[in-house]
Amino acid sequence: MRVALISDVHSNLAALDAVLAAAEAEGAEAVWHMGDLVGYGPQPGAVIARMAEIQARCVLGNHDAAAAGLAGTDEFNGPAGEAARWTARTITAEERALLAALPKVAEDGEYTRVHGSLRDPIWEYLDSVEAATAHFALQGTRFSVFGHTHLPIVIYQQDDHSLAAHRPGDGAGIDIGIPGARVAINPGGAGQPRDGDPRACYALLDTGNLTVRFHRVAYDIAATQELMAAAGLPEPLIRRLARGR
Ligand code: ZN
């Protein structure tokens, strides 16, 4: 099966629709989203509706939890907190209920999905050897897929518990079927990339031949920025979209 791995859409419908179109053209049959459907961006309701319409399998992110009233907004820095409060005010009761019902951790066969890490599912950044070691100690499946850092990466843990990581560029195809290795995959932040490339990102997982291909997709950044300005969302969040930071 071919699965589109998408994470951190952050209420950016133009970015989501761009990666969905690209993934469909590449033969994706399912969509897994690794958390943060909302937060930062201008279209929380439309993103929630699109993901429901395509029956994406989603897990809870920290911004989803804040919007649903399951977490406070104090944990976020100034502009992120402002956007989180705007999101919580803007979504409907039905949308809030959809977010609140998302699981923190989900398993599909050999794959575990989580937003942050298995040690701290919605808040921890899986961005250090220490965090990765703790994550793999809790990973009961051969593969996991995560988000939250907004950086595309593949991390391997070998039988002897040694770690290795790849930072895949646009178009890179990565073999995840290394004998004896467990693997954690982050497709990057679709709606708010932070690696300096402002294009949206996703990855296509082929569960048959155990490969993951990473992609960047151009989308109408200005359209999302205009909607953010019209909604009165903070200026630094509007600017960062164009920088990919
Ligand atoms: Zn995020």
Image (cartoon, rainbow, N blue to C red):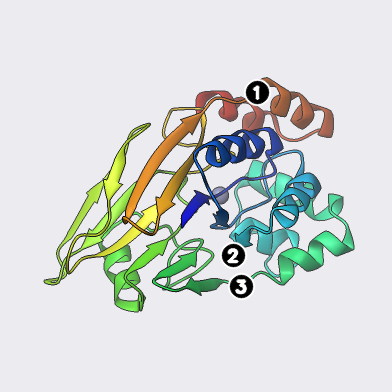
Disc 3 to disc 2: CB gap under 8 Å: yes
First-in-chain label (1 vs 3): 3
Label 1: how many Cα within 10 Å (few below 14, some 14–19, many 20+): few
Question: In the figure, 160 relative to 64: above or below?
Answer: below
Please, what secondary structure does the residue beneath circle 3 have? loop
Residue 159 spot, x, y in % from top left: 14, 71
Tell me the tag on residue 103: 3
Q: Is residue 45 left or right of residue 119?
A: right
Q: Is mark 1 within 8 Å of ligand 1?
A: no
Q: Which residue, given by chain and number where applicable, does mark 2 sit on?
A: 59
- Judge by depth and name the residue closer to the eye, 68 or 14: 14
Q: Residue furthest left?
A: 160
Q: What's under tag 1, amino acid-wise? A: Asp
Question: Could you tell me which residue is drawn at 41 percent across and 43 percent down?
Answer: 151
Under circle 2, the secondary element is loop
Instruction: Give the labeled residue for mark 1.
Output: 220
Give the residue type that dot 2 points to: Val
- Viewer-proximal residue among 192 and 33: 33
The CA span between labels 1 and 3 is 31 Å
The answer to whether residue 112 of the structure is visible from this angle is: yes
Q: Amino acid at mark 3?
A: Pro
